[in-house]
Amino acid sequence: AVQQAEEKEIRERSVVLVGVNEVTDVPPRNRNNVDCETVLDIFDTINSDSVPHQIFRMGSQQEGRKRPIKVIFGNSHDAKQVLRNARSLKGTRFQHVFIRPSLTTEERRKQWEERQKRRQTQQAVTPLIIRGGQLVRK
């Protein structure tokens, strides 16, 4: 129970960046420095003055796959500020980066299932468009 509470507290003050390019042409000891610089550039782009305590890639490295970056802040306010400002990445050089809260495996699975249901209902509805001033099936 204590460990779960600690994990929850860390998740509340963490965000995950998905879609950040991973450099492989630099020595391993320099990769984290490149990731830190990239994360700080992203935070500058969204006008966030939050200072991360920890930045690291999650998972094992695989060819052709970008690992997510987990960023842990000193408090939950900083994480919430970054999540609030995340939409201002649209139209920037980081528009392919998605910032989400840190979630448990169960929470991620539930959200994935909800997205799948939403996609199925959207596909079930016949798409209509306006052509020549009339509503017609696509």
Image (cartoon, rainbow, N blue to C red):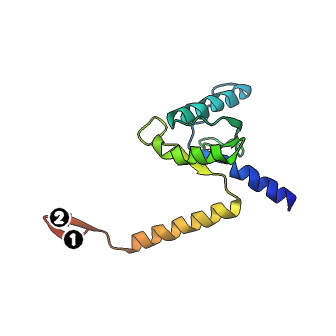
Residue nearer the viewer, 117 or 45: 45
Tag 1's secondary structure? strand
Q: Residue 83 in the image: x percent, y percent? A: 57, 48
In the rendered image, which residue does mark 2 sit on?
131
Above or below residue 19? Residue 113 is below
- CB within 8 Å, label 2 to label 1: yes
Q: Is residue 127 left or right of residue 122?
A: left
Under mark 2, the amino acid is Arg
Q: Is residue 29 left or right of residue 138?
A: right
Q: Earlier in the sequence, mark 2 or mark 1?
A: 2
Res 41 seen here: yes
Q: Residues within 10 Å of mark 2 (few under 14, many from 20)?
A: few
Spatial separation of the CA atoms under disc 2 and disc 1: 7 Å
Q: Hey, which quadrant is residue 35 in on the image?
A: top right
Write the residue at 40% across / 74% down. Answer: 124
State which quarter of the image contains the N terminus. Answer: bottom right
State which quarter of the image contains the C terminus. Answer: bottom left
Above or below residue 109? Residue 10 is above
Under mark 1, the amino acid is Val
Q: Is residue 73 left or right of residue 2?
A: left
In the rendered image, which residue does mark 1 sit on?
136
Q: Residue 133 in the image: x percent, y percent? A: 14, 66
